[in-house]
Image: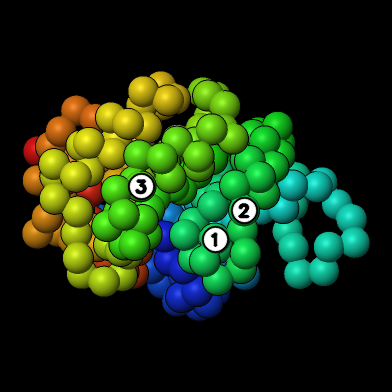
Amino acid sequence: MLIAGNWKMFKGPAEAREFCVALREADLPDDVDVVVCPPYVSLGVAVQVLAGTEIGVFAQNCHWADEGAFTGEVSAPMLRELGVYGTLVGHSERRQLFGETDERVAQRTRAALAAGLQVIACVGETESEREAGETASVLRRQISVLEADDNLVIAYEPVWAIGTGKTATPEIAREAHETIKELLDLPVLYGGSVKPENAAELLAHAAVDGALVGGASLELDPFAAICRASRS
Ligand code: PGA
């Protein structure tokens, strides 16, 4: 079971330090892998404060080249040098707001894996795609560019459930996770309005291998509660 907290563009270094100091002391279950994904500027402090713990620090994105004239970008080897353990790629906000394509997601994934990072690659359909009955074909398209790897995990995040308070039913999540697993035999996290109240139910099915948590990962108590609920 893996629970990853995606902080998005929240928590600069000072807040990140405070959170990580508290997280280090929190009551987290031993049998759950816990990961935080701070913004780039807060990765260094998170790595420092969480050193020597089992809690992993992931970036939220990484470029596909090792270095080069790519203003504003950060590469996988740079993240490795900082002590970062992995990265998200293809989050729906990247796809929707920053023009990320499936091919770019694949390039980023390959580069991050080659650099020795773990990768959580995000997929998921929009509301209109779901209403048009296109969920399975969208997932097939997004997954088709990826290859199985021991260090790759998929996060199924229906776009209509992200930050909206609308959660997929456990049945919707199970169905999507099974579709993904038929294409790539990898762990699949669920993401989209995961909260302490719905975590146990969402994570109960064998096809759900953990959660990618946005809003509820920004405060310690709900995040730790989700980690604990995922075990039961
Ligand atoms: P949310 O975000 O939990 O706030 O819906 C999930 C995500 O975007 O990873």
Q: N-terminal of the two: label 1 or label 3? A: 1
Residue pointed to by mark 2? 101
Q: Position of residue 65 (x, y in %)?
A: 80, 47
Mark 2 touching mark 1, by CB under 8 A? yes
Using the image, determine if residue 207 lies above or below residue 197: above
Mark 2 touching mark 3, by CB under 8 A? no
The amino acid beneath tag 2 is: Thr
The amino acid beneath tag 3 is: Glu
Residue pointed to by mark 3? 134
Say the numbered circle drawn on residue 56. Answer: none
Using the image, determine if residue 96 lies above or below residue 232: below
**Toward the viewer: 84 or 140?**
140
The amino acid beneath tag 1 is: Arg
Q: N-terminal of the two: label 2 or label 3? A: 2
The residue depicted at 32 percent of the width and 31 percent of the height is 179
Q: N-terminal of the two: label 2 or label 1? A: 1
Disc 3 crowd rating (10 Å Cα; few below 14, some 14-19, many 20+) is some
**Beta carbon at label 3 within 8 Å of ligand 1:** no
Residue 128 visible in rendering: yes
Using the image, determine if residue 77 lies above or below residue 192: above
SS at mark 3 in the image:
loop
Say the numbered circle drawn on residue 95. Answer: 1
Query: Which label sits in the foreground, 1 or 3?
Result: 3
State the separation of the CA atoms marked 2 and 1.
6 Å
Disc 1 crowd rating (10 Å Cα; few below 14, some 14-19, many 20+) is some
SS at mark 2 in the image:
loop
**Toward the viewer: 155 or 56?**
155
